[in-house]
Image (tube, rainbow, N blue to C red):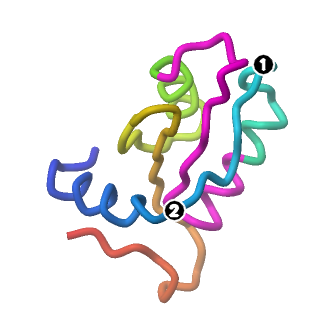
Amino acid sequence: MLTGKQKSYLRSLGQNLKPIMQVGKNGLTPNFIENFNQALEDHELVKISVLKSCLDEKGEIGKALCEETGCELVQVIGNQILFYRESMKENKNDKILLP
């Protein structure tokens, strides 16, 4: 569980990120979830974009991805959602250090 200070810090880091993935009319497919999980492992902080053709609500998409991958929802703003999950990689230099 992230504190308010940690979420604020992650939001500031995510402000300059571009969305890595897009959710479209097919919604959350198993392939999308697998790729999203790998992106979290590689980057720790991931921003996705929800297209207008998507029939699901942004909040529901965020909750579903958090349940499936064990990540934290940092922010939903407009059509973009920001997620965080600490990586299990050995390389400590690439990790985001939370306050």
Query: In the image, is residue 27 above or below residue 9?
Result: above
Q: Magenta segment range?
A: 36-58
Q: Residue 91: image x %, image y %? A: 57, 85
Secondary structure state at the residue bearing disc 2:
loop
Judged from this view, the residue extending furthest toward the top is: 55
User: 77 and 88: which one is in front?
Assistant: 77
The image's mark for residue 17 is 2
* Residue density around tag 1, few if under 14, some if 14–19, many if 20 or more, within 10 Å: few
Secondary structure state at the residue bearing disc 1:
loop
Judged from this view, the residue extending furthest toward the bottom is: 93
User: 42 and 26: which one is in front?
Assistant: 26
68 on left or right of 76: right
Residue at x-position 49% and y-position 59%: 45
Q: Which residue is mark 1?
A: 25
Q: Amino acid at mark 1?
A: Lys
* Residue density around tag 2, few if under 14, some if 14–19, many if 20 or more, within 10 Å: some
Q: Residue 87: image x %, image y %? A: 53, 65
